[in-house]
Image: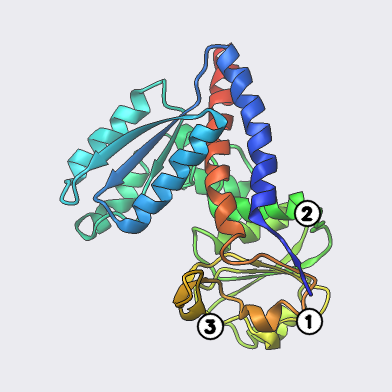
Amino acid sequence: MAKLLLGKEVTDALNASLQTRTAALREKGTVPTLGIIRVGANPSDLSYEKGAVKRAELVGVEVKKFELPEDASKEDVLAVIDQVNADDSIHGVLMFRPLPKHLKADQNEICNRLDPKKDVDCMTHMSNAGVFEGLDLGYAPCTPAACMEILDYYGIDCKGKNAVVIGRSLVVGKPAAMMLMGKNATVTVCHTKTVNTAEICKNADIIVSAAGVLNSLTKDYVRPGQVVIDVSINWDANKPNAKGGLGGIAGDACFSEVEPIVDAITPVPGGVGSVTSTVLVGHVVEAAMRRLWKDQ
């Protein structure tokens, strides 16, 4: 059986460190603060917001919410971003995306209005450039950063290893590939047009699956000795749940097939997703520390 790379263990360790750092900041008169901008009331946004607020409170980070109606105009959203940019008490900002459909054409302009120094979830072009150039121009996306935290916590050395990332989105796939290269892995990115993805994956030491397709990673893609980081959150209507019925979240991996073969795997739920909000809060604390150093 594979070793389960549990997010809770990683989160507990990160929380302990963040509590110490937050306490030190407060002693110097700095209260790390996260600003949350939400347009509308999408249930998934509300769920993530609830978890992020809880995580922030646990480590001593304060939260300021900026809630706009579903039909908010571009000017309304830009005005809120200008407000948080000018507010020195706010160190990091999370804005839920995608924005409502009527703002889709303006999303790039809106996202890039945010000060990159407060961009704790990599929504600006400057932050993305920082990931690709290895510079502190902002902060990496929280989900691939959570993958790296899991690898670090469990002592999985990427140096010289063959890593495969399934998925090429700007949110997970591409930054995950760059961050793995930053750990000196040799990286291949597979996507919907890749030929022989299964064969490529079998040659990997580490697989980061971010396809967003239920049961797409089967026994045909893996071999003994591998580490699988399953990023995706999919709905599986046939998965038994705690209430005795059917229906629950699952990853890309067909867990019953993959888990007995590989050396280690992140479960879904209980893996990457549980670390992501802690990484977000960690970025806020880091932003507060950078501000303090700059002001001294």
Q: Position of residue 235 (x, y in %)?
A: 45, 74
- Would you name the residue on which mark 1 appears? 223
The amino acid sitting under disc 3 is Lys
The residue sitting at 79% across, 71% down in the picture is: 205
- Would you name the residue on which mark 3 appears? 193
Secondary element type, mark 3: loop
The residues bearing labels 1 and 3 have C-alpha atoms spaced at a distance of 23 Å
Residue 106 appears in the rendering: yes
Q: Position of residue 98 (x, y in %)?
A: 34, 57
The residues bearing labels 1 and 2 have C-alpha atoms spaced at a distance of 20 Å
Q: Please name whichever residue, 33 or 115, is drawn nearer the observer in this view of the structure.
A: 33
Numbered marks: total: 3
- Mark carried by residue 166: none
Question: Which badge, 3 or 2, comes first in the chain's sequence?
Answer: 2
Q: Are marks 1 and 3 in contact (CB under 8 Å)?
A: no
Q: Please name whichever residue, 53 or 284, is drawn nearer the observer in this view of the structure.
A: 53
- Would you name the residue on which mark 2 appears? 154
Question: Which badge, 1 or 3, comes first in the chain's sequence?
Answer: 3
Secondary element type, mark 2: loop
Q: Nearer the viewer, mark 3 or mark 2?
A: 2
159 with respect to 81 (left or right): right
The residues bearing labels 3 and 2 have C-alpha atoms spaced at a distance of 33 Å
